[in-house]
Amino acid sequence: MAFTTQQKAYLALSATSIIWGTTWVASKFAIAHAPALQISYLRQGLAGLIFITFFKYKGEAWPTFKQLRALLLISFFLFIINNSFATWSLKYVSSGLAALVGALYPLCVVIIEMIVFKTKQTALTFIGLLIGFAGISIVFYDNAISNHSAGYPFGLLLSTIAMICWSIGTILVSRNKIKMNPYYGLGWQMFMAAPFIFLLSLATGNHIPIQQVPIESWAAIAYLIISGSIIGFVCFLYSMKYLPTAISSLYAYFNPIVAMAFGSILLSEKLTFHILVGSLITLAGVYLVNYSMKKKATMEPLAQES
């Protein structure tokens, strides 16, 4: 039976949700056998090289110095800090909790824009913020009463810093348009991040001789690159092209649930009723904030025309 374009788009959305949710688990598996920051720079360097090579083959021009400077600034927040710290945090916290903290970035974006850019928000946005923080409080409370290693607070700090940097990077991307293929630019951001993360790995002792990286970690890196960075983005682009934005963006709310489920099954990570309920409440709050922002963006041009 042949699938319609819309059915293929929903299948692509499902694939994106599952693949990008499992990358947290794959990263956790990879760092069980090799240093976290080393896994991060290997993944970003190789994935970036693949993107650059592909788009150069397709005829893209070399970026200008001005473009590289802008890409490096965005890369600092989205990859040098966000990806390295998020991967590093998995040494101390579960993949599901790290994914949930990462999913809080829309809330952080709203707070940053209210403080820095003095943007006005709707009542629905504030309701979403309250619901989101209530849900994450339930998750943190359940985790707080558990026995954790001494590095647990450090892991939460790394996750939070990573999420804040992703939020700042997201704002920079939306406010500073770079005139080039966005996925070609993405490749350059990944590739440029690798040497900086490499230096960070040396400075923090998160490094071993490359020949000592075991096959288990290389297998996980291959999955992260092929599935997470290539197949995931192809599916994401397809769903974005053929589905409404409000639907195609739903992958972000499924990622933490997928990470928690696979983390519980494959890595025996703790998944209690309170964590699951708190996560669902958190994601509901994030959804309301995201929905209110998109609704506000849609209404503003209409208000300017009237």
Image (cartoon, rainbow, N blue to C red):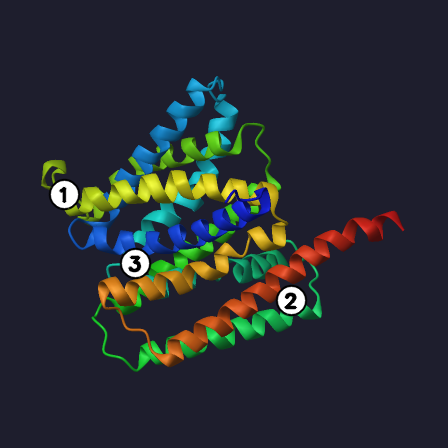
- Tell me, yes or no, if residue 267 can be seen here: yes
Report the side of 125 relative to 15 (left or right).
right
Rendering coords of residue 29 (x, y %): 22, 54
State which mark lies toward you, 3 or 1.
1
CA separation, marks 3 and 2? 29 Å
Mark 3 crowdedness (10 Å alpha carbons): few <14, some 14-19, many ≥20: many
Judging by the rendered image, the residue that carries numbered circle 3 is 89
Residue at image coords 57%, 64%: 287
Rendering coords of residue 27 (x, y %): 28, 52
CA separation, marks 3 and 1? 22 Å
Judging by the rendered image, the residue that carries numbered circle 2 is 125
Which amino acid type is marked by label 1?
Ile
Rendering coords of residue 269 (x, y %): 26, 69
Marks 3 and 2 close (CB-CB < 8 Å): no
Extreme residue toward the front, this view: 1
Rendering coords of residue 91 (x, y %): 24, 59
Report the side of 41 relative to 246 (left or right).
left
User: In the structure shown, which secondary structural element does the residue marked by tag 2 occupy?
Assistant: helix
Residue at image coords 38%, 36%: 190
User: In the structure shown, which secondary structural element does the residue marked by tag 3 occupy?
Assistant: helix
Residue 21 sits above or below residue 231 on the image: below
User: In the structure shown, which secondary structural element does the residue marked by tag 1 occupy?
Assistant: helix
State which mark lies toward you, 2 or 1.
1
Camera-nearest residue between 246 and 98: 246
Which amino acid type is marked by label 3?
Ser
Which amino acid type is marked by label 2?
Thr
